[in-house]
Image: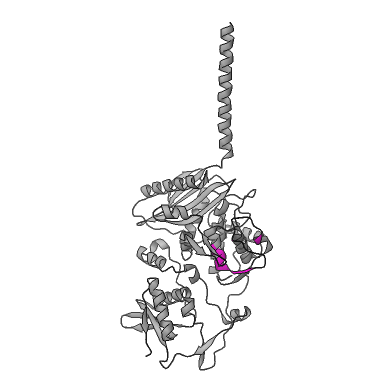
Amino acid sequence: MKNWVSEGVRLGVAFLFLVLIGLDGIESKAGAAPYAAMVIDARSGEVLHARNADTRLHPASLTKMMTLYVVFEAVKRGEISLDDMVTISANAAKEPPSKLGLRSGQRIALRYLIRAAAVKSANDAATALGEAIEGSEAAFTRRMNRTAKALGMTRSTFLNAHGLTATGHLSTARDMTTLGRRLFYDHPEYYNLFSRRSTDAGVRHVNNTNRRLLGAYKGADGIKTGYTRAAGFNLVASAERGNERVIATVFGGPSSAARNAKVAELLDMGFKRAPSRVAVVAPPAPNYAANPSAGPLVVARSLRPRGRPAPAAPVIAIAAAPVPAPPPVPAAAVPRTAREAVSRADTDLAAVAAPAPRPETLAEEGRQVVTRVSTAGGRHWGINLGRYPSRHQAESVLLKTALVELGTLDTALRKVVATIGGYDANFVGLSAETADLACRKLAARNVECAKLGPS
């Protein structure tokens, strides 16, 4: 009898120990951020893998993808330009890290706020962007939610521009994967931002929060990381190999290293499952009509330019007539060699979207419109950037180059010359020294350049 009781006590203790172990395991899992994942073929949008993809979770700084999408849209619509100076509010300046370190009352160009939000994931920059577009972060979040619905992100709710944890600020792996694909197709001129290991953010140079995956995974070129205690380690990643492009999303990684390893595993899975050849089906334009209560996007000020008085001879304004921007072309449709050439030249494609400043805008900012003597009469030098099959291509090359080399080409005139073999892209109105310097700087970027003498 005594032995039977002893054995019963021993078994009871063992059972209690096992129960405690089980409870401890349950508590550990409950304390961890929930896991979700999604993998798609970016060319067609086909889902290649999904797990908890529609579970509403904390997105953390993946939120900034939507913030940036709205900003890119505002620039495209002419509501604001990349060179507009933004005054930092006390609300933006007080945001907790990660941040750029902006001060209340400080003025900084919009383009630098974009870089800081995209590359460093700076919370103060994200808030400042929202306030610059809509006047307040609350108004901006309403636009974020309206845009999300128009993009088909049906289970996302945004309450701020940066992604710090807030009750009800939620998204899903599916919605964030959709947004990553939208950034790639809807705003290809900005997509290179997400692959930069570091960038100039105006007040300082900043490193990419995603630089480890960018450096370790072949073909990776974006997109955005996110972390809070409630969210865990999140990432929307995109990679291209040959003709294939895959986007993978992970929510709830236990560490940045584990998250990156899981994303690499999912990308590998995606490349194995994706067909070598498939028709590229770009997503349709955002459907704002599906959310009529929000109404269409309204531009706050008229975009019709005011008349510009004709300058008195013999001077002309340095600002050349704006060249119509080419329609956005999905990066997947652009030859890989061309994209690599752009990357080697380190061209700031984001700058291409900025409209040339109007003389009246310069006057409002206290800057002076400089005039100079006409180049007629063969008294100046120039440079040639090659011959192109169409006038549009030549004009596009000149515009991009002018924005990259403002230091040497800010006073030059863009000139397209029709020839028997095509259209020559020239800058004219340079001194011999400036023409030589411009060619040397462009050659260092692997851009073809030939000096043109007076003629």
The residue furthest left is 421
Task: Give the number of callouts.
Answer: 0
Residue 149: image quadrant is: bottom right
Left or right: where does residue 93 sit relative to residue 190?
right
Q: Point out residue 453 in the picture as x, y percentages from the top left corner.
A: 37, 87
Query: Split into 4 quadrants, where in the image is the N terminus?
Result: top right
Which residue is at the far top? 1
Is residue 215 located in the magenta-colored stretch of the structure?
Answer: no
Quadrant where the C terminus sits is bottom left
Which of the colour schemes (rainbow, by chain, secondary structure, one colour) is used?
one colour
Q: In this view of the protein, which residue sits in the foreground, 269 or 409?
A: 409
Location of residue 68 in the rendering, given as x and y in whole percent from the top left corner: 55, 61
Nearer-the-camera pick, 437 or 339: 437
Up-down: is 420 above or below 52? below
Reply yes or no: does residue 109 show up in magenta: yes
- Is residue 286 something that shows in the picture? no
The relative height of residue 364 versus residue 350 in the rendered view (above or below) is: below
Relative to 356, 47 lies left or right: left
**In the displayed structure image, the side of residue 197 where residue 241 appears, left or right:** left
Report which quarter residue 26 is drawn in: top right
Residue stretch in magenta:
93-115
Q: Position of residue 342 (x, y in %)?
A: 40, 67
Q: Position of residue 214 (x, y in %)?
A: 44, 55
Name the residue at 61% across, 55% down: 97
Does the rendering let one see residue 12? Answer: yes
